[in-house]
């Protein structure tokens, strides 16, 4: 039988991963996709247990398969899922993808019963055979040969294989790369200067020592080359933040605009697009002359919340950007001169591959002709993908495809006109830290103490990360040390740890009850998110609500759990013993992010996407009318708020000083009145260890915060 083509294998892979058996199994999905693509790329011989452990399950360089059986365990699960799929949903599929026992290189073969059936005898076949001389067939044979040769040598739509080379070798944070149009220069932000801040550097792709371009004490990030390679525009945190331009030699630095992010030169170099944050939630798109001058607002409509990273289309006439409408993220395209934005279709194109659009931000990257290279998150890794776009309409044409398969977080791709791709590759060291609180004051006193010590905390972003909680003696958090997200408890006095859950599906978002006796958490299994509760001393998990999702907070009496439902505009109280739910707050115009109840049970603190944070009074477990809500902070970037143990302070992370710092707002618990202005509890202006999560846990003696140390470098990918 004829061999199975690569296109047929990829089509079958997409069909398998779209099945319910795989959509919620992120590790198995990544496992199968990795081994299939490596085999199709001709690298099947290198697919060993050690390689899979490093690339798929993010084990470190000290990974020893003899001590850690994660690959063998997950391979057995994968074989079982494939067998179940082909016995039920895929029993009529024409292509088989199998993972033979004893190895990790998949086999592709056609199903035997799909042999093409012989055509029925036609009327022409029953006519008498007509004799013709043999020489008459010679031209026909020539045509067939030419057709076969053309088919074998025809240009493929798929991208060529990439060859990788590391460009920087720093031990800190080197990120935000850009490449000149001719592919000769690379710019990036790095803390290699030793002053605990990010400056811009430029180096030749072919070698030579890098040149430091900026030397300000504030962080300089996201550079972009002008088309002629002579200038660099960038974002700086100096003077409240803004856009600056400088020559590639570091001369002639000057400010172009205030309050701007992620600037990009137009293809002809005459204009610049950037994201502004001054007018409305999510910010706006602005276009201004590249030499400076009056910026022009590009309207995207009030119903679309800008997600960032505007990019010019190759013709310089349109802008591609990430936007959210009615709670759904998508890439949009809008004329640079103004007009009505339309969807590009990237999200449905991704979902047709059986891949769920990630909660984390998927922003535009850069163009390689009519293909767009971007970073996409699957599970705990971020890799580079590309999608073909139709010139003119700039809508997606064809299926997106993954082009890198590293185990690190590959991000910020930029492409030269010669097809060179530069990107950052980052490894994150994440731990939970505790700050001692000053008694009766609510402010921190002293240095933080590291509470976790392994590398198993799942990576995330400022907006999307598993939660944790702490009492005086116990810490509950999510760990991936078993190859899957599980809920773990740590005794803060003795340091002993044990797992509350040990299922093959993910469980996370743990919240300890106020007395520390029980933990509520979210379990994701068979496309269903249930709320579960387990006792701390004798863990026996109990499903208390099949479709309630993540717990938000425990009630003041520890008998009920708050959760958000109904498209994020309703808050419920769930009785853990009876399963009865009570509607506490309904606001169809809001999409709630987090809700927490005061220790005395009289107040709710609520955050909502794109809106201020509110303090809401409760009367008999019902929220008062909207006109009685009080604004805690007008900063719409606040993700979650957290009560102090005595109900007198609300803690939250805010970017009001251009960095994700920890702030506090004093409250009169009797009246709900705000006492004075918000005060800084702890600043995080360093570009090193920083709070890449807005979640925290406030106890009577300590604040627990999740901090991340990034280790990143710049890599170059060139077509082979």
Image (tube, rainbow, N blue to C red):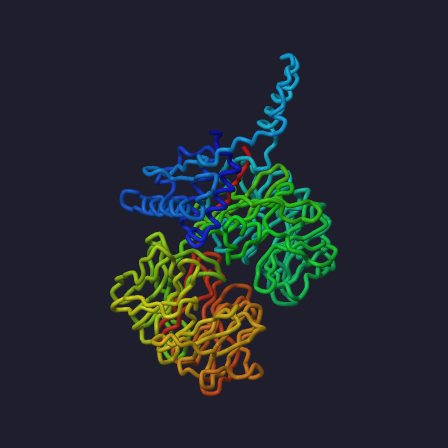
Q: Residue 326: image x %, image y %?
A: 59, 65
Nearer the observer, 266 or 32: 32
Inspect this view and state whether residue 160 appears.
yes
| Relative side of 696 to 365, left or right | left
| Relative side of 537 to 657, left or right | left
Residue 161 drawn above or below residue 670:
above
Nearer the observer, 546 or 668: 546
Q: Residue 444: image x %, image y %?
A: 40, 71
Label count reads 0
| Relative side of 497 to 686, left or right | left
Residue in view at x 40 percent, y 59 percent? 525
Inspect this view and state whether residue 469 appears.
no
Residue 511 drawn above or below residue 413:
below
The extreme bottom residue here reads 670
Identify the image quadrant of residue 576.
Answer: bottom left
Nearer the observer, 361 or 217: 361
Quarter the C terminus occupies: top right
Residue in view at x 49 percent, y 54 percent? 195
């Amino acid at each position: 039988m004829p061999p199975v083509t690569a296109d047929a294998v990829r089509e079958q892979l997409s069909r398998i991963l779209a099945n319910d058996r795989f959509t919620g199994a992120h590790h198995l999905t990544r496992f199968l996709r990795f081994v299939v693509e490596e085999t199709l790329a001709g690298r099947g011989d290198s697919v060993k247990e050690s390689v899979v452990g490093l690339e798929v399950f993010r084990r470190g360089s000290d990974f020893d398969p003899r001590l850690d059986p994660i690959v063998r365990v997950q391979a057995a699960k994968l074989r079982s899922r494939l067998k179940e799929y082909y016995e039920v949903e895929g029993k009529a599929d024409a292509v088989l993808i199998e993972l033979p026992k004893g190895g990790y290189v998949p086999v592709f073969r056609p199903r035997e019963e799909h042999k093409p059936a012989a055509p029925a005898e036609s009327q022409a076949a029953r006519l008498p055979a007509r004799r013709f001389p043999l020489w008459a067939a010679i031209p026909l044979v020539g045509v067939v040969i030419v057709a076969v040769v053309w088919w074998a040598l025809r240009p493929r739509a798929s991208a060529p294989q990439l060859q990788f080379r590391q460009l920087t070798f720093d031990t800190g944070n080197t990120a935000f790369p850009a490449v000149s149009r001719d592919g000769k220069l690379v710019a990036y932000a790095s803390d290699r200067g030793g002053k605990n801040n990010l400056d811009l550097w430029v180096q030749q792709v072919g070698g030579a020592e890098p040149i430091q371009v900026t030397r300000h004490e504030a962080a300089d990030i996201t550079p972009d080359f002008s088309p002629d390679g002579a200038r660099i525009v960038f974002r700086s945190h100096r003077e409240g933040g803004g856009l600056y331009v400088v020559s590639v030699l570091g001369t002639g630095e000057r400010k172009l605009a205030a309050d701007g992010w992620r600037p990009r030169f137009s293809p002809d170099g005459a204009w610049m697009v950037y994201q502004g944050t001054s007018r409305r939630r999510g910010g706006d798109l602005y276009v201004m002359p590249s030499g400076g001058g009056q910026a022009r607002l590009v309207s995207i409509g009030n119903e679309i919340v800008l997600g960032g990273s505007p990019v010019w289309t190759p013709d310089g006439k349109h802008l591609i950007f990430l936007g959210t409408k009615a709670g759904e993220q998508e890439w949009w395209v809008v004329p640079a001169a103004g007009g009505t934005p339309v969807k590009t279709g990237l999200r449905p194109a991704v979902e047709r591959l059986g891949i769920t659009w990630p909660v984390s931000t998927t922003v535009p990257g850069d163009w390689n002709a009519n293909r767009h290279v971007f970073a996409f998150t699957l599970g705990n890794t971020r890799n580079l993908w590309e999608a073909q776009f139709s010139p003119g309409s700039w809508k997606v044409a064809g299926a997106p495809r993954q082009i890198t398969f590293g185990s690190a977080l590959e991000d910020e791709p930029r492409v030269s006109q010669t097809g060179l791709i530069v990107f950052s590759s980052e490894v994150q060291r994440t731990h939970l830290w505790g700050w001692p609180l000053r008694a009766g004051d609510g402010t921190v006193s002293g240095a933080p103490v590291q509470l976790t010590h392994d590398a198993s905390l799942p990576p995330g972003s400022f907006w999307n990360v598993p939660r944790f909680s702490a009492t005086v003696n116990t810490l509950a958090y999510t760990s991936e040390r078993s190859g899957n997200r599980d809920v773990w408890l740590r005794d803060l006095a003795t340091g002993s740890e044990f797992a509350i859950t040990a299922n093959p599906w993910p469980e996370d978002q743990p919240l300890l009850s106020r007395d520390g006796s029980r933990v509520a958490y979210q379990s994701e299994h068979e496309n269903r998110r249930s709320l579960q509760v387990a006792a701390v001393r004798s863990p026996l998990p109990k499903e208390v609500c099949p479709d309630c999702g993540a717990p938000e907070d425990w009630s003041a009496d520890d008998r009920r759990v708050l959760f958000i439902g109904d498209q994020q505009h309703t808050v419920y109280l769930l009785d853990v013993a009876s399963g009865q739910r009570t509607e506490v707050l309904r606001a169809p115009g809001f999409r709630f992010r987090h809700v927490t109840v005061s220790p005395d049970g009289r107040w709710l603190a609520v955050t909502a996407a794109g809106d201020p944070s509110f303090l809401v009074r409760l009367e008999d477990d019902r929220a008062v009318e909207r006109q009685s809500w009080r604004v805690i902070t007008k900063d719409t970037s606040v993700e979650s708020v957290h009560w102090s143990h005595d109900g007198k302070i609300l803690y939250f992370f805010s970017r009001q000083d251009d960095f994700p710092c920890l702030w506090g707002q004093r409250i009169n618990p009797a009246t709900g009145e705000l006492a004075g202005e918000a005060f800084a509890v702890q600043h995080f202006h360093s570009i090193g260890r920083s709070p890449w999560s807005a979640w925290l846990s406030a106890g009577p003696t300590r604040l627990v915060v999740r901090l991340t140390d990034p280790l990143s470098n710049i890599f170059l990918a060139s077509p082979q």
